[in-house]
Image (cartoon, rainbow, N blue to C red):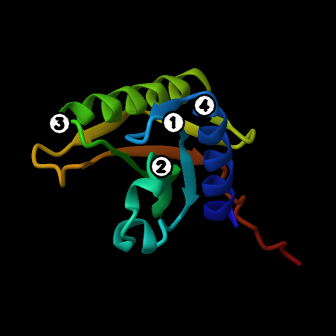
Amino acid sequence: MTGVGLVLALSAYVRDVVKDYRLESDGGGEKRVTVYEQLIPEEVFEHDDAEEYHPLIGVSLRTMEDDERAELTVDLTLGTYSEDRDGWRDLLNMMDTVRLGLLKKQLLDGRYRLITPLTAEVLERQPVPFFYGFMTLRYMMYQALEERSKRQ
């Protein structure tokens, strides 16, 4: 439940961070960011009108590691759509909005602490008119206390 809890808490927080964020659609209207938990549906990438599914953010748990500190790694996939070749600016602005929001609130749900630095990457080659970026976040989670046997 710990991994599920982080994906749900982080998704809810990212939704709150981008709730007022809008991008102009090529049709002239404004589009809100859709946040997906764990999996971005295949139709986002295969649908003839894929613009309808962007901008988007996918929040996906990648790894859980238990050693001296318990750590979860989460990937954010951020995507925008623009017929304009300067559409990369929309992506970078959205990434910056999310980054600043994450740094403002480094403790989620009272139990997941962000471990800095967080990393962000934008690939040089983009599948224009789609623009994608990626963020990798690491969170420290609470650990179970080891049970000790009682001597009789």
Give the mark toward the camera: 3 or 1. Answer: 1
**Disc 3/disc 1 C-alpha distance (Å):** 19 Å
Q: How many neighbours does mark 4 have within 10 angstroms: few (below 14), some (14-19), or many (20 or more)?
A: some
Residue 57: which numbered mark, if any?
2
Q: Earlier in the sequence, mark 3 or mark 2?
A: 2
Q: What x and y, as percent, mark residue 60?
A: 48, 60
Label 1: which residue? 29
C-alpha distance separating marks 4 and 1: 21 Å
**Alpha-carbon span between mark 4 and mark 2:** 12 Å
Nearer the camera: disc 3 or disc 4: 3
Q: Earlier in the sequence, mark 3 or mark 1?
A: 1
* Residue nearest the observer in this picture, 28 or 61: 28
Q: Which residue is label 3 attached to?
A: 85
Residue 32, relative to residue 93: is it above or below?
Answer: below
Image coords of residue 15 (percent x, y) = 63, 41
Q: Nearer the viewer, mark 3 or mark 2?
A: 3
Q: Secondary structure at mark 4?
A: helix
Label 1: state its secondary structure. Answer: loop
What amino acid is labelled 3 in the image?
A: Arg
> In the image, which is nearer the foreground, mark 4 or mark 1?
1
The amino acid type, in three-letter code, at marker 1 is: Gly
Which residue bears the numbered disc 4?
Answer: 17
Give the image location of residue 146, x and y in percent.
Answer: 70, 64
Horizontal side of 60 relative to 85 (left or right) equals right
- Classify mark 2: helix, strand or loop: strand
Identify the residue at the far right of this view: 152
